[in-house]
Amino acid sequence: AKNAGRGCIRYFSESLTQAARDRFHIESRLRQAIPNNELRVYYQPKVDIRSGRIIGAEALVRWQDPVDGLIMPFIFIGIAEETGLIKSLGEWVLAETCRQGKEWIDAGLLPLNLAVNLSAHQFHHGNIVRTLSDVLEITQFPAEYLELELTESILMQRESEMVETLNQLRSKGVSLSIDDFGTGYSSLAYLKTFPLDVLKIDRSFVMDIEKDEDDRAITATIIKIAHTLGLKVVAEGVETQQQLEFLDAHGCDMYQGYLMGKPMPAADFITLLKRINH
Ligand code: C2E
Ligand code: CA
Ligand code: CA
Ligand code: CA
């Protein structure tokens, strides 16, 4: 029994060491991913529910590792946030999305609304307003086509400073959305405190619309409240026609989800866009 116990402890600490080693490994490789040109932006179509047309996309980062292949954000976004690497990663995604957007505009594919995710770190370390101005200046992407997605973890901190920063961002011409709405705390208060344009209903409500009466009530109510406050509403994670029909019946403005398309490389996105919008 004694031996088994020791074995157990040894096994446990070895797996912890392994986890730490994996983290360190990911971190040091992630540090090289930007200079080595291994990050990619994938685009998930955003659809106008009334017309059925694709009106834009959300930019979502992928890591194309030469050995491991395509790595999804849940593997590295957390590590990037904890180590501060998210700052350069986030700036890269913003710049690359605007560069790509400008290329699309020049090719006559207008108007396309592109949304980029921001992380809390980008607000508290470095000047996000300045970064945005620089990127818009360098890429010449029109600010009115850019949307910045904010999570509650961003809005949670230093309220009056945050309102000021968001107003500055908006004065550049971009729109602001609250992401994953309904998953955190005191979300309703955020809607009246912060200058927001768009509310994104979290996938966790949308996915159970068919089965769960509570989720139907919550979703319908969120849409109503958002509209009363002058916000547009995007439903996330729409996978079925039935979900879409419910959202349409309740006046939801836009949706994203596998029903129209997963996040995909730029070229595939444009192929889909041309097919759907013809
Ligand atoms: P998010 O911002 O909530 O992005 C939506 C996620 O839901 C994406 O996962 C997307 O692929 C997934 N999704 C969309 N439609 C459906 C659907 O119909 N069904 C299902 N099952 N899933 C759907 P992804 O691309 O793996 O990204 C995960 C998260 O990583 C994002 O969640 C976001 O929080 C973070 N992330 C991704 N790119 C960036 C970035 O450039 N910067 C920052 N700060 N975070 C990012
Ligand atoms: Ca998002
Ligand atoms: Ca989301
Ligand atoms: Ca539920």
Image: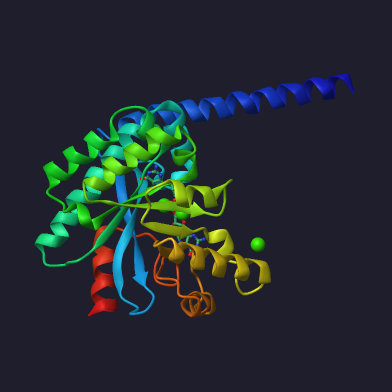
In the displayed image of the protein, which residue is found farthest to the right?
1
Query: Residue 244 vs residue 161: left or right?
Result: right
State which quarter of the image contains the C terminus: bottom left
Can residue 235 be seen? no
- Determine the residue positioned at 70% across, 26% down: 12
Q: Position of residue 69 (x, y in %)?
A: 39, 47
- Determine the residue positioned at 57% across, 29% down: 19
Q: Position of residue 181 (x, y in %)?
A: 51, 54
State which quarter of the image contains the N terminus: top right
Q: Quadrant of residue 6?
A: top right
Against 5, residue 272 (above or below) is below
Against 101, residue 129 (above or below) is above
Q: Position of residue 204 (x, y in %)?
A: 58, 59
Q: Position of residue 40 (x, y in %)?
A: 30, 47
- Determine the residue positioned at 32% across, 61% down: 57
Q: Nearer the viewer, residue 8 or 140?
A: 140
Can residue 203 be seen? yes
